[in-house]
C-alpha cells in the first residue's frame, strides 16, 4: 500500500497543476477567450478528478497503517510522521487554499461575463423607446414578445 506521505506529494503536484490551469482560465475569462476556455476545461476536470482520487488513496493509506481513513486520521498520523510530513501537508493545504481562491475569483469573472451577455441580449430584445419586451425575427424586425393581449370572446 502507498504511504500517506507519497500521496501528499502526488496531491501537491496535482493541485499545483490545477492552479496553473486556473490561472490560465482567469486570463481567458478576462480576455473573453471562449476558445481558450473550451481547451482547458476538460484538463481542469481531469485534474479535479485526479485530486479526488488521490485524496481517497491517501485515506486508504491512512487506514492501512492503522489510522482513521479521514482528515481526523490524517492529523493523528501527522503527529507520528514527523516534520517532513507536516511540511508537505501544510504545503498541500496552502495550495488548496490558493486553488479555492482562484476558483472564487474565476466564478466572479464568469458571473460578470454572464451579466454582460444578459444585458446585451436584453438590449437586442427590447425595442427602443418601448417598455414592451420583444426580439428580432428572421426578417430583422422586432416583434413583440410575451403574453398576447388579444381577448377571446366566446
Image (cartoon, rainbow, N blue to C red):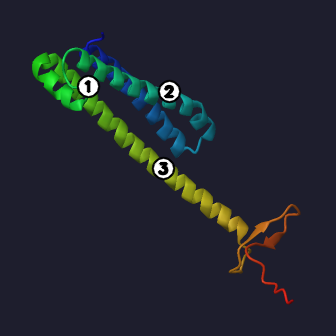
Q: Secondary structure at mark 3?
A: helix
Counting residues from the start of the chain, the first of labels 1 and 3 encountered is: 1
Residue to which mark 2 is pinned: 46
Q: Secondary structure at mark 1?
A: loop
The answer to whether residue 82 is seen in the rendering is: no
Disc 1/disc 3 C-alpha distance (Å): 37 Å
Q: Quadrant of residue 18?
A: top left
| Residue sitting at the far right | 139
Counting residues from the start of the chain, the first of labels 2 and 1 encountered is: 2
| Residue sitting at the far front | 154
Residue to which mark 1 is pinned: 69
Position of the N terminus by quadrant = top left
36 lies above or below 136: above
Horizontally, residue 147 falls left or right of residue 93, namely right
**At which x and y percent is residue 7?**
31, 17
Q: Secondary structure at mark 2?
A: helix
Residue to which mark 3 is pinned: 109
Horizontally, residue 60 falls left or right of residue 149, namely left
**At which x and y percent is residue 86?**
16, 23
Q: Nearer the viewer, mark 3 or mark 2?
A: 2
**In the image, what residue occupies the spot 40% across and 31% down?**
19
108 lies above or below 37: below
Amino acid at each position: 500500500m502507498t504511504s500517506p506521505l507519497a500521496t501528499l506529494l502526488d496531491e501537491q503536484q496535482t493541485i499545483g497543476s490545477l492552479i496553473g490551469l486556473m490561472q490560465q482560465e482567469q486570463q481567458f475569462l478576462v480576455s473573453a477567450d471562449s476558445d481558450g476556455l473550451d481547451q482547458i476545461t476538460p484538463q481542469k476536470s481531469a485534474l479535479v478528478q485526479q485530486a479526488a482520487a488521490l485524496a481517497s488513496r491517501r485515506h486508504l493509506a491512512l487506514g492501512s497503517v492503522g489510522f482513521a481513513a479521514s482528515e481526523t486520521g490524517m492529523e493523528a498520523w501527522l503527529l507520528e510522521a514527523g516534520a517532513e510530513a507536516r511540511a508537505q501537508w501544510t504545503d498541500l493545504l496552502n495550495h488548496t487554499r490558493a486553488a479555492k481562491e482562484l476558483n472564487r475569483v474565476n466564478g466572479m469573472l464568469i458571473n460578470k461575463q454572464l451579466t454582460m451577455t444578459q444585458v446585451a441580449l436584453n438590449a437586442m430584445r427590447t425595442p427602443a423607446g418601448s417598455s414592451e419586451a420583444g426580439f428580432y425575427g428572421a426578417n430583422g424586425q422586432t416583434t413583440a414578445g410575451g403574453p398576447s393581449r388579444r381577448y377571446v370572446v366566446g
